[in-house]
Image: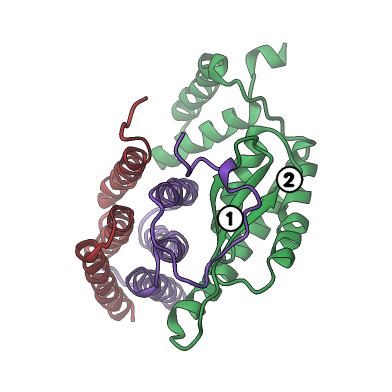
């Protein structure tokens, strides 16, 4: 029953929060309208979602988010140091990153995470979908980079999405 | 203090916009120019937010949100065009 | 501008200044890094964080000076969601057009033909 009414509970929650942020006030009428929208929009768009993704560990998501924010800050300091130091010769590399997780949503989250964190950008996914192509701005040991991404992010995503 | 901070930030963002403009003119390739345009819209977003603080009005928020959305769509459309020669497949 | 209590004034000022510095660093990187793939790193990270800092400052400013207001947070969320996507698309375009890369770029792909930067 609950599945019928709320096919995507986290999407509904996100839509409600987004609606209230956009209005910038909280009153009973707005909350009711927001709840109605948050129920109707997932019901309407559910047919188009052919990539089922279920979050199994909501608490881990919060932990992942905090970790990501800290890493974004550190990565920006790194990039700033690379940009501002004229003498340092940068060593870019195109690295192939083998994926352990499956599913479109987890891979998308991982790719976005890689793009936002220290000196790496996801450029491409291999045709069979089992590897990402990463461009790293300044890397000395590509294997170590791959290991650190695996331990820091991919393990956590695996726990969150159970895939 | 706040007056100084906002003026300082105005100057910083204007220098940043000039640097982006230089990259936009210089190129050398099309993706560089698209990247420069992308950075320009993000920087002008911050200028709008600062302008809102300077004039003590929240009305620039809607403009900034619209610029964020349209700028993203523009970047995606241009990059897609470079990739496929077609935007809607 | 209205007069804020001094803690809020320091907080807003430092957020704005740090944000502006990050955005400037991102633009400097865009102007002086050697090749396209390297230039892609600077704006997507630094400028996004810089604008995020300025907008956080504006949230604090309006929350303290007028009524509590969080809706500027939407812009930050939106930027952080879209920055990786536009970076990804631009990187794809750059690989597809086979732009010149600096000489010391190491290409560690084992099967280069498996990526769609080769023509279909």
The picture quadrant where one finds residue A74 is: bottom right
> What hue does chain B carry in this figure?
red
Quadrant assignment for the C terminus of chain A: top right
Can you tell which quarter of the image residue A115 is in? bottom right
According to the image, what is the colour scheme of the structure? by chain
Residue B46 at what x, y percent from top left? 32, 61
Which numbered disc covers residue A134? 1
- Of residue A21 and residue A129, the one placed in the foreground of this image is A129
Q: CA distance from mark 2 to mark 1?
A: 18 Å
Give the labeled residue for mark 2.
A157
Under tag 2, what secondary structure?
Answer: helix
- At 67% across and 52% down in the image, what residue appears? A97
Which mark is first along the chain, 1 or 2?
Answer: 1
Q: Which chain is purple?
A: C
Q: Is residue C66 above or below residue B86?
A: below
* Residue A51, above or below A120: above
Residue drawn at (26%, 71%), measured in percent from left and top?
B19
How far from the left and from the top, in percent, is residue B87?
Answer: 32, 32
* Disc 2 packing (10 Å; few <14; some 14–19; many ≥20): many
Tell me if residue A32 comes above or below residue A91 in the rendering.
above
| Residue at 72% across, 10% down | A1
Pick the residue in front: C118 or B7: C118
Q: Residue C82 appears at what percent x and percent y? A: 45, 46
Q: Using the image, determine if residue B43 lies above or below residue C75.
A: below
């Amino acid at each position: 029953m609950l599945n019928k009414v709320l096919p995507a509970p986290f999407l509904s929650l996100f839509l409600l929060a987004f609606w209230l942020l956009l209005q910038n006030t909280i009153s009973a009428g707005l909350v009711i309208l927001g709840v109605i929208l948050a129920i109707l929009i997932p019901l309407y768009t559910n047919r188009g979602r052919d990539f089922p993704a279920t979050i199994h560990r909501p608490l881990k998501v919060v932990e992942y988010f905090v970790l990501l924010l800290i890493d974004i800050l550190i990565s920006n300091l790194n990039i700033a140091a690379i940009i501002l130091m004229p003498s340092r010769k940068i060593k870019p590399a195109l690295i192939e990153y083998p994926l352990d997780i499956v599913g479109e949503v987890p891979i998308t989250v991982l790719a976005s995470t890689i793009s936002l964190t220290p000196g790496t950008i996801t450029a491409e996914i291999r045709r069979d979908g089992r590897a990402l192509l990463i461009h790293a701005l300044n890397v000395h040991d590509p294997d170590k980079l791959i290991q650190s991404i695996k331990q820091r992010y991919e393990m956590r995503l695996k726990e969150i999405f159970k895939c | 203090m706040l007056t100084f901070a906002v003026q300082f930030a105005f100057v910083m963002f204007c220098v940043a916009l000039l640097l982006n403009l230089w990259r936009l003119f210089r190129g050398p390739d099309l993706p560089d120019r698209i990247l420069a345009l992308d950075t320009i819209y993000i920087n002008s977003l911050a200028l709008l937010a600062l302008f809102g603080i300077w004039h003590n009005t929240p009305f620039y928020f809607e403009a900034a949100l619209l610029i964020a959305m349209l700028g993203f769509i523009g970047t995606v459309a241009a990059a897609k065009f470079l990739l496929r020669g077609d935007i809607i497949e | 501008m209205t007069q804020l209590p001094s803690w809020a004034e320091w907080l807003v000022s430092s957020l704005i200044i740090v944000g502006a510095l990050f955005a400037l660093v991102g633009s400097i990187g865009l102007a002086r890094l050697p090749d396209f793939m390297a230039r892609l790193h600077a704006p997507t990270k630094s400028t996004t964080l810089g604008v995020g800092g300025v907008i956080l400052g504006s949230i604090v400013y309006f929350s303290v000076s007028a009524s509590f207001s969080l809706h500027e947070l939407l812009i930050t969320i939106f930027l952080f969601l879209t920055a990786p996507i536009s970076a990804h698309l631009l990187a794809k375009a750059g690989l597809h057009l086979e732009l010149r890369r600096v000489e010391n770029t190491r290409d560690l792909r084992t099967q280069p033909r498996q990526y769609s930067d080769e023509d279909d």
